[in-house]
Amino acid sequence: MAEGVITRGTTHPNRLRRVDRWVLTWPGLRSTENPLVVDVGFGASAITPVELIERIRTVRPDSRLIGFEIDPDRVARARHDLRALAAQGRDTTGIRFDFGGFEIPVAGGARPVIIRAFNVLRQYDESEVAPAWRLMLDRLAPDGVLVEGTCDEIGRVATWIALTRQGPQSLTVSLRLRELELPSIAAERLPKALIHRNVSGERVHEFFLDLDRWWRTHAGLSTFGAVQRWVATVESMRDAGWPVHAGRTRWRLGEITVDWASVTPRE
Ligand SMILES: C[S@@+](CC[C@H](N)C(=O)[O-])C[C@H]1O[C@@H](n2cnc3c(N)ncnc32)[C@H](O)[C@@H]1O
């Protein structure tokens, strides 16, 4: 029995580039002896898991990927896609697709260093998030990360929670800065654990209020480009006391990452 239910399979080439780019920086990916990557709920085609492993192989060439789907037809479809990609000359070694859910049934019991579950839990109830996290974290390697998040159709707006075996660690918001009106556009693409919490009294609501405020405050920097404006926004967030991670290299990509504790839902 696979854990979970079949949901809509919508996907799109390149839509997960923002989270994939972040995953490449995960320290365990470089240090692990067994670079197994798992994509849970890859959807209607093989494209986003193939893109994920191709990106990961730029830093860890020996990595391999298993994509799990709870819909057997989508597993069959992905296997077909993979053969077609191989026929086109794409390197598909070390990539496979299997039936499975949040229990992540890796044959032989190897533990993935990266688990990506994107646009999967958004179609579940909020109360189902913690049990699903627990099931996936039980399979994760000790130095691994689970990225669980959501994005828009073409990946211009993405948010995700990074979890280690100890539980949730951070929230990242990643935005295409060109033509960005307000960063709170990301509120409608929050992971399931937070999407209903963008209301007065909740920490994540405060987060977006502040983010919008600083984005407006630094409007004058647009003359120098949206990246300058965003970097100033993130610096102001940090100076105002938000526990902001990383530095300018990440911020310049349109990212902001904060401690989970600063946005965690109130009971
Ligand atoms: C919207 S698609 C996401 C596709 C891809 N990850 C993306 O972001 O473009 C969600 C997919 O997750 C699958 N799914 C839902 N619950 C699942 C579970 N517990 N285990 C594996 N797959 C699941 C659904 O069958 C569906 O194909």
Image (cartoon, helix red, strand yellow):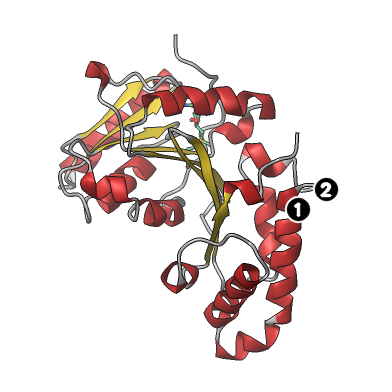
* Residue beneath the point at 32% across and 32% down: 141
Q: Where is residue 22 in the image (x, y as percent from the top left)?
A: 41, 55
- Amino acid marked by disc 2: Gly
Horizontal placement of 80 versus 92: left or right? Answer: right
Q: Residue 205 carries which label?
A: 1
* Residue beneath the point at 64% across and 74% down: 236
* Residue beneath the point at 68% across and 59% down: 185
- Amino acid marked by disc 1: His
Q: Mark 1–mark 2 contact, CB under 8 Å?
A: yes
Horizontal placement of 167 versus 239: left or right? Answer: left
Q: Can residue 137 be seen in this view?
A: yes
Instruction: Give the labeled residue for mark 2.
Output: 201
Residue 171 against residue 41 in the figure, above or below? below
Looking at the image, how many numbered discs can be counted on the residues? 2
Q: Position of residue 242 (x, y in %)?
A: 63, 62
In front here: 181 or 34?
A: 34
In front here: 111 or 20?
A: 111
Quadrant location of residue 113? top left
**Mark 1, secondary structure of its residue:** helix
